[in-house]
Image (cartoon, rainbow, N blue to C red):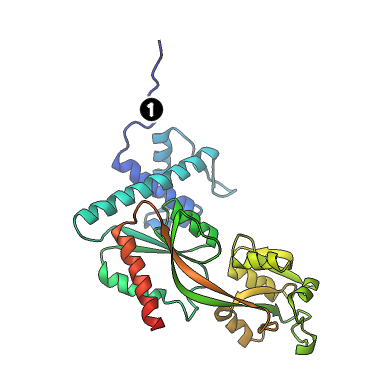
């Protein structure tokens, strides 16, 4: 006779959803103390909620102590399932809001870093348009690397992403918004910083003599570096890290002109033969291609489109 085993969790309750949201915030913030401000509750209460969830699931989700906060293997699996579950709950809430012909709930927007200083980007204007249309929607703005944004939109963690174009995926829908110019920079103590224009490398092949710092994930930066065979000796995972590597004086690296301008004004870095060593990026908004995006997401996309179209014309 086959013996049926009882499910460890049983029926999912509203309290379980609340505990899972606390758990997600703790993981995202990197610990209970760090999550205290985000959740607006005391650390001891956060700890009790996590303990209640562990008891409810009959699993140890994380280790906390002098060594710091860390997920157990079971905790990593529960976190991944939590993202899927909460994404589904938020999608359900959005659909109910649509039935009632109002826009409520939450919208998570993820943007590639150092976009705010780009004069071609008008995300602030788009947000203002959206806030006027949907004042009841709680907007969450995230800054993340390109690959994290793509993955987050695909798994439902983010509803909208804004990224530089590199490769396209059939699972995502793209809307071109604005552009960005990238120049090759060297730091003040780099051999090229004080070199006369006659002594600067005149073509891509001559750059092979110098160490290069590039982004460590698929991007226009990585595509160009591989195409012209730059001598990568250091890797960064956002524009801030690339800037730091350039400022060391050990590496050449590409940065957006609008972000590097302050370093240039401070005489801490300069562009190397900008008429040769530069490239343009187009930035796109991305949403999941299927299923059809919720009305809140479509409304925000329309605001992005309008803000950038108005500026163009």
Q: In x, y percent, where is residue 66?
A: 58, 48
SS category of the residue bearing label 1: loop
Q: Residue at x 37, y 72 (%)?
A: 305
Q: In terms of image quadrants, where is residue 302? A: bottom left
Can you see residue 249?
yes
Q: Residue at x 47, y 44 (%)?
A: 80
Q: Is residue 98 left or right of residue 199?
A: left
**Image quadrant in which the N terminus is located:** top left
Q: In x, y percent, where is residue 94?
A: 28, 54
Q: Is residue 49 above or below residue 301?
A: above
Q: Which residue is mark 1?
A: 7
Q: In terms of image quadrants, where is residue 201? A: bottom right
Q: Is residue 192 above or below residue 95?
A: below
Q: Residue at x 45, y 57 (%)?
A: 172
Crowding near the residue tagged with mark 1, few <14, some 14–19, many ≥20 C-alpha atoms within 10 Å: few
Can you see residue 125?
no
Direction front: furthest residue: 170
Q: Residue at x 34, y 44 (%)?
A: 17
Q: Is residue 41 above or below residue 131?
A: above
Direction left: furthest residue: 100
Q: Nearer the viewer, residue 290 or 3?
A: 290
Q: Is residue 12 above or below residue 128?
A: above
Q: In x, y percent, where is residue 26?
A: 45, 51
Q: Nearer the viewer, residue 17 or 81?
A: 81
Q: Is residue 208 left or right of residue 53?
A: right
**Image quadrant in which the C terminus is located:** bottom left
Q: Is residue 138 left or right of residue 68?
A: left
Q: In terms of image quadrants, where is residue 254? A: bottom right
Q: Nearer the viewer, residue 122 or 247?
A: 122
């Amino acid at each position: 006779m086959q013996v049926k085993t009882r499910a460890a969790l049983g029926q999912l309750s509203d309290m379980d959803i609340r505990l899972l949201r606390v758990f997600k915030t703790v993981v995202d913030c990197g610990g209970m103390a760090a999550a205290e401000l985000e959740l607006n509750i005391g650390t001891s209460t956060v700890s009790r909620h996590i303990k209640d969830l562990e008891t409810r699931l009959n699993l140890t989700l994380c280790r906390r102590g002098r060594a710091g906060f860390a997920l157990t293997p079971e905790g990593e699996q529960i976190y991944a399932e939590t993202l899927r579950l909460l994404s589904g709950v938020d999608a359900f809430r959005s659909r109910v809001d649509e039935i009632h012909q109002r826009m409520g709930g939450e919208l998570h927007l993820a943007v590639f870093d150092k976009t705010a200083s780009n004069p071609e980007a008008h995300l602030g204007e788009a947000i203002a348009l959206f806030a006027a249309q949907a004042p009841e929607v709680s907007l969450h703005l995230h800054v993340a690397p390109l690959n994290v944004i793509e993955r987050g939109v695909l798994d439902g963690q983010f509803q909208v992403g804004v990224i530089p174009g590199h490769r396209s995926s059939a699972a995502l829908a793209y809307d071109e918004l604005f552009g960005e110019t990238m120049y090759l920079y060297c730091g003040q103590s780099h051999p090229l910083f004080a070199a006369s224009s006659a002594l600067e490398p005149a073509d891509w092949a001559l750059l092979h003599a110098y160490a290069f710092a590039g982004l460590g994930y698929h991007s226009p930066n990585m595509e160009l570096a591989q195409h012209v065979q730059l001598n990568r000796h250091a890797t960064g995972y956002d524009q801030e890290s690339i800037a730091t590597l350039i400022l060391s004086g050990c590496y050449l690296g590409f940065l957006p002109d609008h972000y590097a301008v302050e370093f240039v004004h401070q005489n801490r870095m300069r562009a190397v033969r900008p008429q040769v060593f530069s490239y343009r990026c187009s930035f796109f908004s991305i949403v999941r291609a299927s299923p059809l995006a919720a009305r809140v997401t479509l409304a925000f996309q329309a605001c992005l489109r309008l803000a950038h179209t108005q500026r163009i014309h």
